[in-house]
Image (cartoon, grey):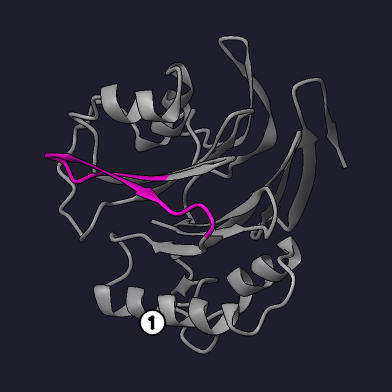
Amino acid sequence: MCTATYLPFRSDGFILTHSRDEHTTRQPAVLPRIHDQGGQPLLYPEDPYSGGTWIVGGLQASVCLLNGAFTAHVSTPPYKHSRGLVPLHVFDYRSVRDFCRRYNPAGIEPFTLILAEAEALTEFRWDGQSKHVTFLNPHRPYIWSSATLYSPQNMRRREQWFRNWLSNIGETRVEAIRHFHLNAGKGDPENALLMNRNNKLMTLSLTSLVRLPGNHRMLYTDLLQDQSVSLVFNQHHYAIQ
């Protein structure tokens, strides 16, 4: 499920923003905090159901997850483990390229990963049979919509909303892209970025990872609980704002 956007700054850095669409019966997520994984500080909100996440910031890369690959698929459990663990697995490898080359997703339900680094942007899709790795231009903006929720036609509509928004923005600001995630497609609640399908399936949270040289910031809003947190971290410390 979910929607993600990547927005580069004109100089160094980027904003990776993720709208999490989920069933409202799912257990509420744990607010973002720093986790230690093998001596690496990783910043992410946690899904208590799986212990995984849908977006994570590390010192070398920022990663987010969307359910599904290219098209909607039929879920056929049991699977090896939750897709929410895959973003964390990235940090078990020496680099993003090493992960893309060596990671074996066999037995995991189809997914899409967006892996953003200071000077690189990679899309990793697993369709249940094959890996598909694409190296994207890190100086261009992108939008992704989950293949499990949105038809190809509605994906194209959302891409047009994004293009229209891009043509009207000036300076790249995190407030602007978050406003887009909260307002694009208003009037069509089933396909808007802030989606709601009969109060059973809806956008539960909005998370932005802002990467600047030597500094990482996460802005997180739980839209159901009306809770927000902003954290800054780097190699030496982290702080809650």
Q: Is residue 135 magenta?
A: yes
Q: Residue furthest bottom?
A: 187
The secondary structure type at the circle numbered 1 is: helix
Position of residue 103 relative to residue 63, above or below, is: above
Where's the C terminus, which quadrant? top right
Q: Is residue 161 left or right of residue 7?
A: left
State whether the magenta stretch is mostly helix, strand or loop.
Answer: strand
Position of residue 90 relative to residue 209, above or below, is: above
Image x and y of residue 126, in percent: 24, 42
Image x and y of residue 45, in percent: 61, 38
Image x and y of residue 205, in percent: 60, 56
Q: Determine which residue is flagged by label 1.
A: 157
Circle 1 Cα neighbour tier, 10 Å, few/some/many (<14 / 14–19 / ≥20): some
Magenta part of the chain: 122-139
Q: Is residue 133 magenta?
A: yes
Where's the N terminus, which quadrant? bottom left
Identified at 28% across, 52% down, the residue is 68
Identified at 65% across, 67% down, the residue is 177
Q: Is residue 77 left or right of residue 96?
A: left
Image x and y of residue 82, in percent: 34, 33
Position of residue 198 relative to residue 16, above or below, is: below
Q: Amino acid at mark 1?
A: Arg
Identified at 18% across, 37% down, the residue is 77
Q: Quadrant of residue 181?
A: bottom right
Front position in the image: 194 or 154: 154
Front position in the image: 122 or 147: 122
Residue 38 visible? The answer is yes
Residue 185 visible? The answer is no
Q: Residue furthest top?
A: 38
Identified at 52% across, 89% down, the residue is 187
